[in-house]
């Protein structure tokens, strides 16, 4: 039962984490700033369904990166205030965003509750954090702040790599085996060797990036308990997977494992 006492917040790694993301920001934006398969098929459609944006909704976008989803929410009628701790990402976001998009960008630390509260108490209809909680050394200060920043019953939607199936502690595999009929077949999947205990570990979000990034693993019970402790209620989640191709091929890409969701998208209400 050691996992119950294991820490899940890593403030001592905050400075190192910030340096890594400033070093990777431009490279990441050059690679996926215009979208990739995960964004267009998994993350964004599920996030849009759970956010259910109405015209005029004031939305806080936390860890906005280069602003891709902020711009999408503005297209859907949202009024967006977007923040990121990386000055490099905010510069990229401003350069990518038309002046008339109606988006404010700010450099802000999502772990600084007092700084976040300066954006307003009970001001926001909705908040979103797209594929970033697992990149944050601390999430509890953010959740505590959001509970105060959102209007009553306001929605916070976050997406993460699935903590059960898509972490640095899993191994993807393809293997051949013989069925009872005597025929040989090939299957792909993941092997999970560690899950319950939170950890911080360096990994590559995109192969070849300038610096390996820090991944902060929080199992489902830790992730959800952090929401509950801040006063949120989780009322919906989705586990999107890539669609099956017409001609399935064996391999270790996520498109080869269409029964295993690499992404988790959650809606919590204040």
Image (cartoon, grey):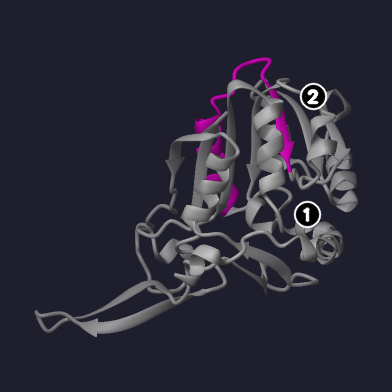
The residue beneath circle 1 is 29
| Label 2 element class | loop
The residue beneath circle 2 is 120
83 sits to left or right of 150: right
User: What residue is rendered at 86% in x and 47% in y?
Assistant: 92
Query: In x, y percent, where is residue 23?
Result: 86, 64
Check residue 10 for magenta coloring. no
User: What residue is rendered at 37% in x and 73% in y?
Assistant: 188
Q: Nearer the viewer, residue 100 or 173?
A: 173
**Segment colored magenta:** 38-62
Which callout, 2 or 1, points to the residue nearer the camera? 2
Which quadrant of the structure image shows residue 51?
top right
| Label 1 element class | helix
In this rendering, the count of numbered labels is: 2
Q: Residues within 10 Å of mark 2 (few under 14, many from 20)?
A: few
User: What residue is rendered at 56% in x and 42% in y?
Assistant: 229
């Amino acid at each position: 039962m050691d996992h119950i006492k294991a820490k899940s917040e890593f403030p001592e790694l905050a400075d190192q984490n910030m340096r890594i993301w400033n070093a990777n920001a431009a490279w990441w934006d050059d690679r996926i700033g215009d979208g990739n398969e995960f964004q267009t098929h998994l993350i964004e459609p599920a996030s849009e369904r759970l956010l259910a944006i109405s015209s005029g909704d004031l939305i806080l976008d936390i860890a906005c990166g280069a602003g891709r989803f902020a711009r999408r929410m503005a297209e859907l009628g949202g009024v967006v205030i977007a923040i990121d701790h990386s000055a490099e990402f905010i510069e990229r976001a401003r350069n990518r965003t038309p002046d008339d998009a109606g988006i404010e960008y700010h450099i802000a630390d999502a772990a600084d509750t007092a700084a976040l509260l300066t954006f307003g108490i009970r001001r926001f209809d909705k908040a979103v954090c797209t594929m970033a909680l697992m990149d944050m050394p601390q999430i509890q200060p953010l959740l505590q702040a959001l509970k105060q920043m959102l209007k009553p019953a306001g929605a916070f939607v976050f997406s993460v790599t699935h903590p059960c199936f898509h972490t640095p502690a899993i191994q993807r595999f393809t293997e051949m085996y013989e069925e009872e009929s005597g025929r040989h077949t090939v299957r792909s999947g993941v092997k999970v060797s560690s899950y319950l205990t939170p950890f911080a570990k360096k990994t590559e979000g995109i192969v070849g990036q300038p610096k390996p990034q820090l991944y902060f693993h929080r199992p489902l019970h830790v992730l959800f308990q952090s929401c509950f402790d801040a006063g949120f209620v989780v009322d919906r989640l989705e586990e999107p997977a890539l669609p099956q191709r017409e001609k399935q091929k064996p391999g270790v890409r996520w498109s080869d494992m269409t029964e295993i969701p690499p992404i988790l998208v959650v809606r919590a209400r204040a």
